[in-house]
Each structure stands twice: as C-alpha cells, then as structure tokens.
Amino acid sequence: MERRIILDPGQWIAFMVVAVGAMIMLGPFYFMFVFATHSNTDILSVPPPVWFGGQFVANVQVLLEKLPYFWNNLGVSFYVAIITTALNLFFCSLAGYAFATYEFRFKNLLFMIVMSTLLIPPFLGMIPTTLIMTLFGWMNEPRALYLPMACSALGVFLMRQYISSAIPRELLEAARMDGCGEFATFRHIVLPLTGPAMGTLGLITFITSWNNFMTPLVVMRDMEMYTVPLALRALQGSGQVPWGAICAGSSIAVAPLLVIFILASRRLIEGMTAGALKG
Amino acid sequence: MSAVMERRETPAAAPVKSRRRWLTRKTAPYVFISPFFILFAVFGLFPLLFTIYLSFHYWDPSTGLGGMKWVGFENFTFVLTDDWFHKSLYNTFWIALVSGVPQHLAAIPLAFFLHTRLSRWRNAVVGLYFLPFITSTVAISLVFTSLFSRDYGLINVLLTQMGQWEVAGLRPLGWVFPTENIDWNDPGYTKWVISFVVWWRYVGWNTVLYLSALQTIPKDLYEAASIDGASRRQQFWHITVPLLRPMMFLAITLSIIGNLQLFEEPFILTGGLGPGGTSIGGPDQAGKTAAMHMYATAYIESDFGTASAVAWLLFLIIAMMTWANNKAFKEKS
Amino acid sequence: MKIMHALLLSAAMSGSVAAQTVTLEVASFPDLDRGIKAAIPLYQEAHPDVEIKLVSLAFGDHHNAMTTSLATGSNLPDVMAVEVGFIGKFAASGGIEDLSKPPYNAMQYQDQFARFTLPQATGGEGNLAAIPVDIGPGALFYRQDLLQKAGVDESAFSNNWDAFIEAGKKVKEKTGAYMVAHAGDLKDIIIRSDLEDGEGIFFDKENNSLVTSPRFEKAFKVAKAARDAGIDAKVKAWTSEWTEGLRRGQIATQMMGSWVAGHLANWIAPESAGLWRSKQLPDNVYASWGGSFYAIPAKAQHKHEAWEFIRFLALNKSMQLEAFHKLDAFPALVTAQNDQFLQQPIEFLGGQKARVQWKEAADRIPAITVNKYDTIADEIVNAELDKVLLHDKDIKEALADAHKLIKRRVRY
C-alpha cells in the first residue's frame, strides 16, 4: 500500500465519519470522568458540566465513607478476574485444541453442545446457582464466582478457530514422532503458539468477569466480599444517589480495564487473526 | 471436581518424556474437553433442568422450595397467549434489528477502512471504538440518562440549537433538527434510544471481529486483483466480502444471541424498576424486552414457574433464529 | 431464660461456650441503613457482647437477594429490612417468624405503633411478619410563591378535582410551572380515597379485583383531564428531570410521603427554602408512602438477639426520634410521635409546624389490608393508564381490560 498525502473527497468524508464516530464512542467516558470531578448539584444541573471540576477528592471521600470496603471490593474483583482469566486460558485452549486437531467420536455433536450453551438465557440461573453454592458451602467465597465461569463456550470456540488455522498439523505429528506425550505436545508445542489468541481471550474474560453483576449479587453477602459493580450498585437507593461518588468509583473501576486494554490492544486484534499470516 | 483438576494439572508438571498410558491419542481429546463438560454439568445443566422442572410448576420463591405446585403445561399456554409476552417479543425483535443491522453495516466498512487506510493509528482508533464494550453499565447508564434528559440533556441542547439557528429570521435547519426539546422517554423514542446505546456498545466489538478476519486475507490476492485492473470497490465486493463470510456468520450469530437476550441496557435506560418497583420498560412498556419480561415475571410478580416458561420459549426462539441464520449462510455459499 | 437462650445459641454457633460474642447480621438498603449505622454504637454500649454486621444493597437488589435467600432457605440474615411494598409477599411466604407468637408476643405492643402499620405486616393467616420502624404519612407540598403569583389559593386543594385542574391551568399560564410532576400521581391519590379499615386498594377479601369500581374510574378521569389540560410535567419521581424541575420551580406541587420535605431541603431544592408549604392531601385522602419494617427469617441464627435489636430500633423512643431528626424518617412509634420535637417549626416550610399535621394524617390513615398480588395489580393499572394517557384509550375499556388482565395473572 503506497502512502498518499493527497486524499480525494470521498476519503476525506470517510476520515471525518470515522473521527466523528470515535468522538461518539468516547463521549460517555469523557462525561463519566468529568462527572467524577463534580458535586451532585452540578451534575444534575443544566446544562451539565462539560469540563473537569475540583470535586474528585471529595467524591472519593464520599465513596469511601459510604463504601468503607471499596478497596477490598477492588481486590476481590481483581482476584476473581485474574483467576477466572487464568483458568479460562488453560481450559479453553485445552478444549479448543482437542476440537481443532483430534478426530474422535461425537466430536461434532459435543462441539454443538458447547456452542448451544451460548443460547441459554442467563437469568433464571440466579436461584439454582444460589442452591448449588449453598450446597457446596461456597457462599461469600470467590470460587463461587470464578469456577462457574472457568471455561467459557466462546473461549473454546475462539481457541478452536485459532488453533485449527494457526498450528500446522505436521508440527504436531513431528512432535509425536519425537515421543512427545499428548499433554506434552499441547504444553510445549501448542501453548507457546497460541499467544495472540490467548491475549484476546484473556482480555475478554477479564472484562466479563470484572463487569459480572448477577452472580455476585446472589452469592456475595458480606460487603467486604462485594465485587466493584455490586458495591457501586449499593449506593443507588431511593432518594439521593451520590452520582459524583458513583462516577468516581466507576472511573477507578474502569481504570484497570483501560490500562490492560492499552497494553493488550495490539494483541487483541492480532489474536483474532486466525493465523493465516503465519501459516 | 478437585480430583479432576489435579489430574489435569499433574501432567503439566511432569517431564516431557514421561508418558501416561491412560492419556492416549484416543482418550486425550475427551480428557481435554472434560473440564468444560464437568463445569457445565455442575453449574449449567443443573440450573437448566431446574428451570425445566420449574416451568411446569407454580412457585412463589419466597415460600421456599416446598412451595411448588404442579400445573402441567399451563404456564406455557399462559405465556403463549399473553399480550405482554407478545409485546415484549415484538420490542426485542425491533431493537435487535434496529441496533443489530447497523452494527454490522458500520463495522464492516469501518474495519475495511481501518485495515486499508490506517496503519500507525489503527490500534488507537480501534481502541476508541472498543471502549464502550469494556465499561460497566452503571456509570454509563447514568451518563446516558443525563445526556438524553428531556429538559436538561446535552443532546437536546445541541439538537435544538441547530434547529433554532437563525439566519435572516429563517431557521434553515429547522426541518432537519427539532426546534423543541424531544421527550426521549416518549414511547415513540424509547426503542430508538435503546437501539442507539446497544449499537454504541457493540459496534467496536464487531469491528474488532471483522478487522481480525480482514488481516487473514492474504495481501497478494489484492495485488493480483490490482494487476488485473480491479478497482478498490471491486476488490471490496469480490475479494473482501466473500472472504469475510465465515466471520460474518460468527459475528451475526453472536449478535442474534446477544440481542435477543438483551436486558441490562434497556432495563437501566428505562429507569430500572422505577420508584414503586412495579413498572418496568418505561411508559407503555415500550422498552420492555423478552428478558425483562422474564425478570418482571420472576421478581415483580414472584411467579418463577411462568418466568421459567418464558425463559424456555425464549431459548427456543433464539435457537430457531440461530438455525435460520445458519441455514441462510449455508445456502448462499 | 433469656441468658440461657443466648448462651445456647452462641454455643451452637461457635461450638464452644467460651466465645460469648454474637455477630448479628442485619440486611438493609439505603437510606434506611443510615439509621442502623447510627444505632450500632448506641446499641453496643448496652450490649458489648453483640457485634452487628450491616449488609446493604440497593433497594431492588436487596429485595431480590432476600427473595432468593427465602427461596433457598439459606444465607438469611438475622434481621431483615423489608419495605412496605414487599411485606405482603414476605408475610405470605412462611419463611418469616410470626412475631405475634411467643417468645416475641409482639401484639402486646400493638397500641404503641401507628394504627395502620401492624395490619400492613399481617399475613393471611393472622401472622405478624414484621415490626414497623418508620412510616410515610402523605402530604401535599406546594410552592406558595408560585400559587400566589398565579392568584390561586389553598382552596384548590379541596375535594374538588376540577378546581385543582383549573388552578393548575392558571399556574401554568401565569408562571409556566407544571401543577404536578405526573398525571399518574393523581391516580395514585384517588385510588386511595374513601378507604375504610379492612378494605384493600386493589382487592376485596375474596381476591376479587376492584379496579372497575368508581374509585378507579374517577382516578383515571382526573389523571386524563390533568394530562389534557397540560398541567403535568410528564416526569416520574426520582428522575433527574423531576429533581431539576423541583429545583427550578417548574413543578408547583408534589404529593408524597412527609419525608420528601427532608429530601427537598437537603439536596433537591435547598435554594427554595421558605417557599414550600405542606398541606393535607386533597379529597380527604390519608395515605402512607413507603414505610420500613424489620422481620426475622425463620432460619435466622440469632433470633433472640435479632429481636432485642429490632425492639431497640422500633420501640426505643430516643432511637426513633434520632432517626426522625436525622433522616426525616417519620416514627412509627406513637410515643415518639407525641414528642415535643413535633412542635418545632420547620424553616424550609416557612416555619410551618408541619410535623403536627403529618401526625394528624398518620392517625387517620386507614388500616387497609395488603394483598400479595398488589404489585401485579399496580403494574397492570399503570400499564393501562399509560394507554389512556398516551393513546386516548377509553377509560371504561381500559379498566375492564385491567380487570381481565389481573384476573388472568392472579391465577393461583
């Protein structure tokens, strides 16, 4: 692709459209950060503030006064998200590898079952999930949050796609000829090559876990063990809602995602690349 | 459970050479996919079966597990003949189409543009478009409620200023832009606002999906086409689009599943449960989706049996739509 | 006996008699949780052996979590806050202690609470599910300055809804302000008029819906007339449009629980101090907005301590006054209602002694019965009112449809 400095009008329009679109995408975040620096009265006044104010520290103070365990809640969210991500990376790549490279009975049927679990509406799980967690004695335990999410169907699918196109079968055969065991082949040949897809899956899993609301709602009963979305929701009663504090809390909560995203955004896109560039 | 996990983890620690007899080429795939199925059996299948069981009962959950009463198919006949369920389905499909179709119509050209026109800034721009996907809904819902506020929202301020802009006593933009504040809560707008927010939230996700697929298309295909004198537009239609089909299939499938299960965005944008806790979906239930109907049946009406029947019918509808999509894609190719 | 009981419970809990401290779990929601937070240190002075763990969730989430816990019989707190809208459901559930029975014998306190509160918390089998802590006697709050500007006086708030709407038109014309926030607010008042003790809003004793009665017809007619006259701002309570409308004097009256005065003074419209007044609701309606109760789940682990704590919150006059003073939570306890504190003028209301007026309303609120299907009926009536207001649906037809829908949905 050669570099062109002069653009024709059509391209200018395209650039403009993309730029305006980017602003629409960015807008609500911008306002979230702006609102985090304003008092409630300012936020609810008209027109609402469009530039940063000086109330951020005050809002954080309100937040910590109302949610004395907020830092704990951040910790719980981190802990759960990291373990969920680690488990998903391992289990999904393992299952994806099996679906991508092995031939076995019921393979297609089993794969269809995996995919069809995506169709289940998540809502009515609330009560059965509570029953199971009570039975296991996992109430208030982080594992009640990460184990049910430890191997996602979407993750299995993504890994299958990636492995089937990015890893040459000959490589696997060669490894086996050298006496590599089934798991060792996975561990030493496949796993190192799945890096980009792992980046994608890791990011998606981390985000999903970080924003999960329904399961924590029914299994976490101690305020110390709340995840961040749950803690922030606890501020919304009837009557006066400390919007400034909620925005401050949300800004703090989204910051780790932003950092991870910035670090991983290259990976994210490359990871989706189903290996054709390499193979 | 833990036994399985241990079994899974020991080989990792084992040296490369040591072979496990039981892990042969025949058994390995079953062992490798077993974590998914074990986890699903414990945490997915039980809720599913429980829901089926419930759908044949009347159950007010606060009465405890002993309070279930067998009612046969009554919940299903009730739901199938229920106007509120029909309305919620209509709303769901409306929003799914109006937010879903533009998602892909915007994401494909955007991905193509990013792929062909941008290199250094590509990741930054993708990042911007992906931002909405990574945030939690609570704060964003507040921001949107504020932006769409009738009397005090920024969107109305901008729109009416355009509409009221006067040149020589005339309002040249008055026929495009409103001159008075729009009540976005009005049933006529509710679904548009929800669709916009859903579009906003997922267009970046789809762009990423398409962009990744574009990157797998070998460059020499385009080069060969250029040599043959194909224009950029021809290249787009004859090379890019056909090669994007598998990803289109995946992305559209995910959109169908996600959009038909839509809950959080419409729930919060229409004011959640409302102050009395009994109205859901905004005025005239204009923003009540099927998933919200299920939620309301369960938690407002305390009728978990009927809610389970709604869940199952919704599941069947989603499965049918996914199947139809599958069929449509297969026929074309 | 009490000590024995406590000892046994704590022994059962910890497995050793040496551990005397009991951790009491209290589940609540904002702003009610503020009252509990304030009560904890005071309670612990007298009960150093009791540790209180407060668990707070958003209003809707709290009741969902409690429903889930009752469903599974697990994870239940010792003290459960219940808002009045959920009390009928929870009272019918069987998962809540009957406080009228020993060891609680709460009926002995019957006369100490506002008379309409205990019937609200009484289930179909005569079981008392919860004890009230605060109530919300309804009042009409209005901007005196706006009414004066429009040349309207208080007679607009009499029994005559035509006069109310006429006054609303004048207010709109002269000041630009809307008379009410939402036409549905008028419906909510009128369906609560002319109720006697023992009657229900939506259902009679045999679970027959009453929505086709003249009471509902009148309510729908007035709401529709208000909408047609353009005197409602079409905003729902607690939205930013609503708070901003009140702040800017765009909404001239608001009918709600007395506690809204505190919200107005503290954050919604502090600038308008002195301009607001309180008056009894029109049409001789005495109604209650909201109200909080405390219940003890049947599977709670520390019922004895839970009951002690509930009694401290609900029957202790100084605690009740503290909540009244700090949170504007109108006490359910009669001795607190009779305190000198009520005589204090309220500056925000132009020095009016409004608390006396609210106490008068509280005395007259009929002891209406609650039905566990009330929420469904309310949901259906609201949906039909939307159709009348937005699509000009015929009122008789709308109510007949509501009746059919209620009958259809109340199936079991």
Image (spheres, helix red, strand yellow):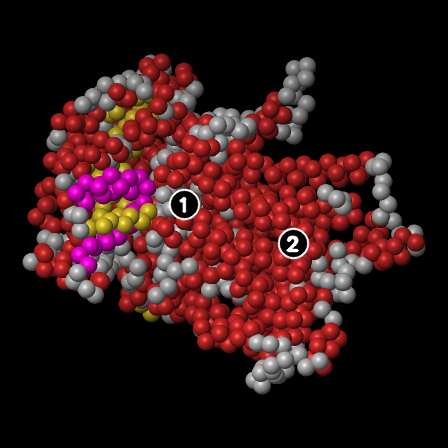
Vertical position of residue B279 compared to residue C285: above or below: below
Q: Is residue C25 magenta?
A: yes
Vertical position of residue C340 compared to residue C26: above or below: above
Would you call the spot at circle 2 few (<14 residues within 10 Å), some (14-19), or many (20 or more)? Answer: many
Q: Is residue A37 left or right of residue C134?
A: right
**Range of residues picked out in magenta:** C19-45
Q: Is residue C400 visible?
A: no
Residue B265 image point, x, y percent: 51, 47
Q: Chain of mark 2?
A: A
- Identify the mark at residue A70; answer none if there is no mark: 1
Residue B323 image point, x, y percent: 61, 66
At 47% across and 67% down in the image, what residue appears?
Answer: B44
Q: Give amino acid for label 2.
A: Leu
In terms of depth relative to the viewer, which is nearer, C115 or B36?
B36
Residue C103 image point, x, y percent: 10, 56
Q: Which quarter of the picture shows residue C179?
A: top left
Q: Is residue B316 magenta?
A: no
Q: The C terminus of chain A is located in which quarter?
A: bottom right
Q: Give amino acid for label 1.
A: Phe
Distance of label 1 from label 2 (alpha carbons): 30 Å
In terms of depth relative to the viewer, which is nearer, A115 or B174?
A115
Residue C217 image point, x, y percent: 32, 39
Instruction: Tell me the residue that label 2 is attached to.
Output: A268
Q: Is residue C254 left or right of residue A267?
A: left
Vertical position of residue A43 compared to residue C197: above or below: above
At 71% across and 69% down in the image, what residue appears?
Answer: A167
Q: Is residue C95 left or right of residue B11?
A: left
